[in-house]
Image (cartoon, coloured by chain):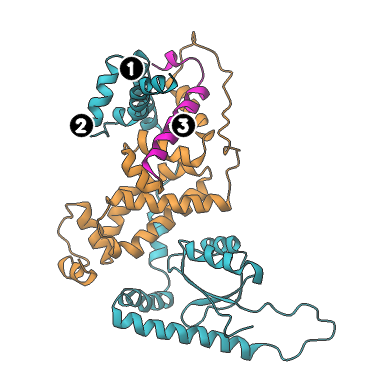
Chain colours: A orange, B cyan
Amino acid sequence: MSWSARITRVPAGATRPITSESELIARVGAKDLQAFEKLYRLYQPRLARFLANLLHRPQLVEEVLDDTMMVVWQTADRFRGSSKLSTWIFAIAYRKALKARSRWPDPLPDDGLEVQVSNDPGPDVELSHQRLSEALRKAMTGLSPEHRAVVDLTYFHGMGYREIAEIVGCPIDTVKTRMFHARRRLKQALPGELSDWL
Amino acid sequence: MQDHIHSAQRPHHEAEELLPWYAAGQLNPPERLVVEEHLSSCADCREQLTFERRLIQEFRSLEPQVEAGWARLRSRIEPPPRRREARKGSAPASRLIKHPAVAALAAAQFAFLIFGAGMLLWLSRPTYHALGSTSPAPTADVIVMFRADATVEDVKSSLRAANASIVDGPTAADAYLLHVPRQQRNQALARLRADDDVQMAEPIDGAVQ
């Protein structure tokens, strides 16, 4: 479908309710600011979460999130629907995040996947939800950004490995391998025994 | 023997790899069947699955630590009027360029642009050097256009990666003239062309020494 055809079909500023993501992005492509605000509010929490896991600097998260959404705004008319909208947007965010990381590496060393095993009390102490969350956050910082991305897209965003492979631009087997190693590292990094978590 | 052990462990390994997506409900029916069949006979994987579900539960309860910034983003979309006028002109042009006839015209204009850039540099080269001057200004050997959505940081990062510096620009067509060390030029061009934020990078040696 050509850009001009889409413009004719979905005029900018149309007021009827938007019923699907494909219609939403078509309107954004036609430079409908209201539609873009809706898209932003739909994706901002998910992208913020995804980027916060990849980049450990809140200011950088904001910058990359804004840059990602600016690319969406400027190139939405070229989105042809060959992948899911979420895949397209997350792939932009992932590329921008890796690029930002090359300018501002993490303050904590995490490239070697070396995770500190916690000295916290063992199995006989009940782990509170808050402690578990904190332990998980810490454990995640021990992973490389490539591993963090796969873990977060699977566990939090509920995406399948095929979609993740498209987002991060690598083969499916690489996604599975990253996930396999990341889970192993997370298990090693969590305090207590595995049974404490079950 | 080793092959035998390896093939015996394969179903376990396959199922174990798929467990996170099984727990997240993201497998297709045949894959689900493979995992479920294996789970019925593997206590380790059943324990692992419980762990996966716990992780999902924990992950989904973690709050993002970033505030909404629609107002901030909107101010980037609606910049001061003068800038907006400039953008209005450039957006349709990028779409038009996909038309074959327009693309041919654009190619001709591009060739002229490179030639023009070269002439501009040649004419602006100083004809004399002050006594004691040992390092003349670097000459441009590459012309580059960045994507409209590239940020200043993106541009800096692209230039650093290619070990390039800006000699002149932006030109009327928003192109920049770069200097890269001669011996690294092919590498720099390859890097620039592979860069997401670079729309075009070409050598301009014919025009400028």
- State if disc 3 and disc 2 touch (CB < 8 Å): no
Q: Which residue is mark 1?
A: B46
Q: Which residue is mark 3?
A: A182
Quadrant location of the N terminus of chain A in the rendered image: bottom left
Place of residue A195 in the rendered image (x, y in percent of width and height, measured from the top left): 42, 13
Q: Which mark is residue A196?
A: none
Q: Is residue A131 left or right of residue A46?
A: right
- Judge by depth and name the residue closer to the eye, B2 or B90: B2
Front disc: 1 or 2: 2
Q: Is residue A32 visible?
A: no
Most frequent secondary structure within the magenta stretch = helix
> Is B136 within the magenta?
no
The residue at the point 52 percent across, 87 percent down is B115
Q: Which residue is mark 2?
A: B29
Which amino acid lies under the numbered mark 2 shown in the image of this protein?
Pro
Span colored in magenta: A171-198
The residue at the point 48 percent across, 14 percent down is A193
- Judge by depth and name the residue closer to the eye, A133 or A185: A185
